[in-house]
Image (cartoon, coloured by chain):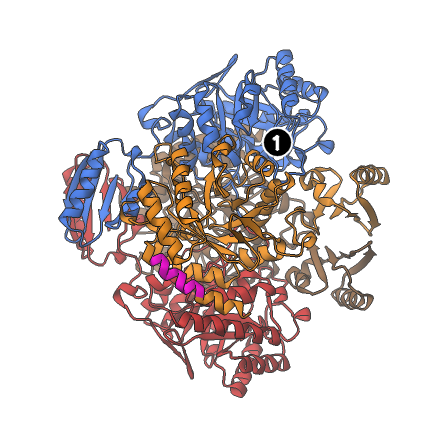
Chain colours: A blue, B orange, C brown, D red
C-alpha cells in the first residue's frame, strides 16, 4: 500500500503518521520526492482502513497494491478450493449443476422436478422456500414447509439441497440443508454473513446487483474471517441500462475471479437474463469461460408458476441444455 | 393495470386468466382489438405480482397505471405525514437537522459535538454505534457502548437520537433510541424491515446505492404494511460512474418523492459526496429543492477520525452551513 | 402500439388525437374502459415518435408492442444477413476473425502482425489509423499513412481490412478499406451514420459504452434507412461499476440480438476486458453463445505498444486462442 | 504522476523506462522500496498517456496526482472565466438564463416564445434547428430554416442565440449564431470538438449521458487546445437506474467543477428530469448550488409540441420559475 502525502507536509506530521502506521504492525518506507513524500507500507495492509487513510488531511492519495481480502485471496492459497457438499463437491474437477424451481409450491411439484433434473444430470436440487420480494404483497414463499418439501425430495433423489436464507434466526430450520444461499440483496447484510461464518455450512454467496467483484470477495471474507471457508461464489447478473434482459450476466467475472480467488464460481443464467430462451446459450458461454457450475431454474409448468415467470425451463428444455453444456465441457477440458 | 395478450390467444385462455384475476378481487375489463386483446384491471392491483403476470405464456406486455405501493402513496393520503420524534417532529412545516459524528468514539467526543451542533441549530443528534463496513477488518463501531454514549448526550442536550440498526436481534438495545436508521445496504433486507414494521418507532430508511425510488417506496411499504407508519425517507447518493464524488446525490428525488408519497424526505449530503467542501452547496441545494431536512456529519477532529474521513465538517464549518441553509429556507418559504 | 389516455379525457380530445394518428397512416382502435380509454395503433408505428405521444397532456402511458426498428428487424427479414467482404463474408455459416494491432505504427509492425494472424486463421486485418482518445494530448494515430500501411498489408496477405472512421469528410481515404468501423463513442453520431448509409460499404457498428441494444439497433437503422444494409454489429463491453475489467462484456447481447435482428454480431473481448489474460476465455464464451465472429487485438511487442497496452496478445498467444476457439466452434456446430 | 513498478523489475528495465520518460520532458525521481520501486514524475504529465504507462509489463500501478487537463484547470487559471456573448456574458457575477423551445417549428412560435422569455428575464434564446434523435424516423428539425427563424427572433428581441450543431460541415450556417451547442451524444465526437477549437465562437459543451466530469473536462480541453477558450460547460443529467425521471441531474457537478475548472457551468433541468413539474425545484437547487446559469425549455403549446413533450414549460410557468430563482439568487449572493 502506498500513501502519497500532500506537498508541504512537515516532518512532524510525517513522523506522527508513520509511528501510527508502525503501531498497526506495518513496515513503513518513506521516500521524499521533489514535492511529494511517498510512504510505502509493507505487511498485512488488509487491516488498514483505506477510507481512514484517505481522510487524513495530509494524505493526497492512497494506492493499494495488494488486495484487501486475505482468506479468499489466491495469492495465499494457490490451489482451487473444493467444497464438499454431501456426496458431491463444488470446485476443482467437478462440474456442478444446481437445478430446480424458483419457489417450492407443493410436494408433487418439487418431487416431479427433482426426479426430472436428476435424470438430466443435475447434481444438486435448488428451490426457494423463503423468497425475497420487492413488494410485501407478493408471494413470500412456503417458508419452513418449503424446506421440508425440499428435504423430502432429497431423501428420495439423494440430491443435496441448496436454498436461500434471509434471516440468521432461521438457521435452525436449515439444519439439514446442504448449501445455504445468500441472495444478491443480502450480499452486504454483514450481520447475516458473520452468523454464517460461525457455522461450518457451505454458503452460496450471490453477487449484489450493483456490487463489484472486490465487494463480493470482501463479503466472502466476512464469512471466512469467522472460520467458515466453505464459500461458493455466484454471478447472477448485474444491473445495467439494458432492458431486453432483466440484468446483464457478467461472464468475465469467471476468469477474473479465478485469478483473484481460490473459491469456486457458479453462474446463474436464469435470474441474470430473465428469459428462458437465453438460458441455453448463456449456460454454454459460462462453461466455455471456465465456470465451476451452473444454477438453472426448472419448472414443470411455467405458464402457471407462482413466481418465476419467464426465466424458467421445462424439464425437457433443461435436458436439452444439459446435452449442449456437456459438449462445451468436453471441448474446454481439452484445453 | 393493463395486460396486453399475445396475438392468437383463444377465448378459453382469456377466460381462465380473467377468472383468476377476478378471484384476486379485481374488476376485469376485456377489449378485443384487431390483433391484440387488452385486459384492463380495476381495483387494488398492488396485490398483483407484475412478474407473475408477465411470465404467463399468453401475456405480451403488462403496464401498471397505478403505483404498486399503497400505504406510502400520496394518492390515498394527500396530506404530508408529520412524524413525531420526542420533543420535535419531521415533515410538514418543521425543518429537521440531524447532525453528529459518523461513528461514536468516546464520551468527550459525542458530548462536545452534541453541544456544538445543538448550539448551531441541530434538532437531532446522529451518530453510528454499529457501523456497516465493506471489510471485516475495518472498525465496526462501539456497538452497545456507543448507544449508551448517544443516550448520555441526549440526556444532557435534550436532542433526540438517530442511529443505525444492522440486526433485528439488537432491537432491545434501541429501546430509548428516538429514530432507528436503516442503512443503504439494508434497504432491501426485508426481514429487518418487517421487524421494524412491528415496532411503533420512527424509522429513517436510506435509499440503496443502486435502487430506484419505486424500490425505496416498496421498502417503506414493507415497514408500513406491518403497521408502522412512522417512516422517514433519506436520499444519500446513488452509485454512478462519477469518481470525483463518492456517490451522486439525486436531488430530483426530493420533488419526485413529494409527488409520489406523503412521507418526509431527508437529504444526506455528507455520505453522498464524501467531500466536506461540497456539503454546504449541496445542503443549500437540497433545501431549495424542498427537502424536509438534512443529515450532516460533524466531527471535532476530522484529521484523526476513526472512520468518517474527508466528508466530515468541524463544528464551526457546520455552524456556517446552518447560516446559509437558513437563508435559502427563508427564500423558499416565500414560494 | 398502445396509448392509455388519462381518466377524464373527453371525446373531443380523443377524436383530435385519433384523427392526427390516422393522418400518420395508422389504424386506430379505441376501447373505453371504466376509467381509462385505450387507443390501439395498428400499422407502421415505427414512424411514431414515442416521446411525442407520451408528452401529450391527455396521455397517461404508451406501450410499444412492435419494435421501433424496421430494416434491422428480424420479424420482417427472418433469414440471417450475410455481408460480403472482399473474398470472405460475415454472418450465416461463416465465422469471422478480425485481428491486428490497436494502432498502426509502422510498415514492419503491420506486415509482421498481418502475416502472423493470417497464419493463425484470421479472416480480416484490423488496425487503427484514426484513434479516438479521451485526451487531446494522447497519440491520435498515423491517420492517412496508417490506412496506406493497412492496404499494403492487404495487398501482401489478401486479408480484407477493417479500420475506424471518425469524420465523414475522411471517407475518400476509406475508398479501398473493406469494412468501415464506427467506434463506441460515435454510435450516436447520427450525421456520420447518415453519411455511411449513403455508401454501399460494409459498416462495423460498435455499441456505445452506456447504450442499450435498442439504441444500437436504432443506430443501425440510421445506416440502413439510407440504403446501406451492410451493417455488422459489434459488442465491445459496456460501462458498469466493475473496475477489475475495463468494461463488462455483455455476452447475452449475442443471443438477444440474434432474436431481434438478422444482422451479424461480432464480439470484441480485447477492448471489453482490457486484460490480455481474459481474451481467451471470453472469446471462447462468445463463440459458445453463438457470435458470428471475433475482433481481437494482436501486437508483436505489447510491452512497447504505443497505445493498446495490457489488452493485446502476442501472435503466439493469439494462435493458441484460435485453437481453443475452433474446439468450441465444433462443439457448438453440433447443436 | 507516480508509477509503481512490479516486484523483480531489474535496473536495466528501470533505466529504459526512465530515459524514455525523461525524453518526454519530465523529471524522473526513482525511489526503491523493500519490494516495489516507485517512479515519481514531475513536469507536464498531461502529455503522458496513462493507459500506455499501465500497459507496460513492468508497471504495477499508475496514480495521477495532477489532473490530465491543463487549459481548463483552475490550478493554472485561478480566476473564473467570463465568456462574452453578444451584449451579455456567461460566468463571473452574471447569471445566465437560456430559454426557448426544444425545436424551432415556425416563425410565430419562435417569435412568441422569444418575446415571452425575454419579458420574464431570459438573457439568451435557445432553440433546436438540428435535432439529434435516436430514431431516423423521428422529426429531425427544420435545419437551416430553423436557424434563420432563430436569427429573426434575435433581431427582434436582441437576445443572443444558442443552438446545437451536429456536423462540422454545417459551421457556415452557424456564422451568426452566438453560442454553438455540442449535445450530450457528441461530447466525445473529437473531430467536431477539434473543428470548434479552430473557431473563436463560444461553445456550450453538454456532459454525455454516462460520462464523468474528468471526461467532460478532457473534451473541453480538446476545444481549448485548438485555441478556443470560450467553453461553457453544461450538466444536463446522467443516465442512472432511476425511471421516474428521464435522467438524474447531478447537481454536485456544479461545486465540484467550480473547484476543478475556471469555466462557467450551466444547468439544464428540463432535459435532465424530463418532467415540467420538476423544472422549478431543480432550477432553484441549481442556483443554490452555485450554477452560473440555467437552460430551460419553454413552449407556447406543450400539448402539441413536435418533439419536446412533457419537459416543457408554458411562458407563464417559466415566469413563475424566474421569480423563485431570483429569490434563491438573492439568498445565495449574501453568502
Residue B307 locus on image (x, y percent): 34, 42
The stretch in magenta equals B317-326
* Callout 1: SS: loop
Which quarter of the rendered picture does the N terminus of chain C lie within? bottom right
Residue B63 locus on image (x, y percent): 70, 49
Q: Examine the rendering and report whether any part of residue C103 can be seen.
A: no
Q: Examine the rendering and report whether any part of residue B186 can be seen.
A: yes
Q: Main secondary structure of the magenta part?
A: helix
Residue shown at the point (82%, 45%) measured from the top left: B28
Residue D119 highlighted magenta (yes or no)? no
Q: Which residue in the protein does label 1 denote?
A: A131
Residue shown at the point (38%, 67%) measured from the top left: D194
Residue B322 highlighted magenta (yes or no)? yes
Q: Is residue B335 left or right of residue B108?
A: right
Residue B198 locus on image (x, y percent): 60, 36
User: Up-down: is A38 above or below C18?
Assistant: above
Which quarter of the rendered picture does the C terminus of chain C lie within? top right
- Pointer 1 indicates a residue of which chain? A
Tally the numbered discs. 1
Amino acid at each position: 500500500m502506498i500513501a502519497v502525502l500532500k506537498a508541504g507536509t512537515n516532518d512532524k506530521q510525517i513522523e506522527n503518521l508513520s509511528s501510527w502506521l508502525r503501531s498497526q504492525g506495518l513496515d513503513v518506507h518513506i521516500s521524499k520526492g521533489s514535492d511529494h513524500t511517498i510512504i510505502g507500507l509493507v505487511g498485512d495492509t488488509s487491516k488498514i482502513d483505506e477510507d481512514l487513510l484517505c481522510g487524513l488531511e495530509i494524505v493526497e492519495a492512497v494506492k493499494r497494491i495488494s488486495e484487501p481480502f486475505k482468506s479468499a485471496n489466491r495469492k495465499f492459497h494457490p490451489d482451487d478450493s473444493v467444497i464438499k457438499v454431501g456426496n458431491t463437491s463444488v470446485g476443482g474437477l467437478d462440474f456442478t449443476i444446481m437445478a430446480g424451481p424458483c419457489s417450492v409450491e407443493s410436494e408433487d411439484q418439487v418431487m416431479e422436478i427433482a426426479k426430472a433434473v436428476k435424470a438430466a444430470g443435475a447434481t444438486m436440487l435448488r428451490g426457494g422456500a423463503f423468497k425475497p420480494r420487492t413488494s410485501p404483497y407478493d408471494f413470500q414463499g412456503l417458508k419452513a414447509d418449503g424446506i421440508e418439501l425440499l428435504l423430502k425430495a432429497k431423501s428420495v433423489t439423494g440430491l443435496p439441497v441448496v436454498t436461500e436464507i434471509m434471516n440468521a434466526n432461521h438457521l435452525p430450520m436449515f439444519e439439514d440443508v446442504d448449501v445455504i444461499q445468500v441472495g444478491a440483496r443480502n450480499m452486504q447484510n454483514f450481520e447475516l454473513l458473520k452468523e454464517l461464518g460461525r457455522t461450518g455450512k457451505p454458503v452460496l454467496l450471490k453477487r449484489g446487483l450493483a456490487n463489484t467483484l472486490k465487494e463480493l470477495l470482501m463479503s466472502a471474507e466476512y464469512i471466512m474471517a469467522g472460520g467458515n471457508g466453505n464459500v461458493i461464489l455466484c454471478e447472477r447478473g448485474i444491473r445495467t441500462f439494458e432492458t431486453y434482459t432483466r440484468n446483464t450476466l457478467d461472464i468475465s467475472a469467471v476468469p477474473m475471479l479465478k485469478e483473484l480467488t481460490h473459491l469456486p464460481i457458479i453462474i446463474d443464467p436464469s435470474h441474470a437474463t430473465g428469459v428462458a430462451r437465453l438460458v441455453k446459450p448463456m449456460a454454454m458461454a459460462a462453461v466455455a469461460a471456465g465456470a465451476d457450475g451452473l444454477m438453472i431454474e426448472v419448472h414443470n409448468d411455467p405458464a402457471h408458476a407462482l413466481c418465476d415467470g419467464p426465466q424458467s425451463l421445462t424439464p425437457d428444455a433443461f435436458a436439452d441444455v444439459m446435452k449442449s453444456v456437456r459438449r462445451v465441457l468436453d471441448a474446454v477440458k481439452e484445453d
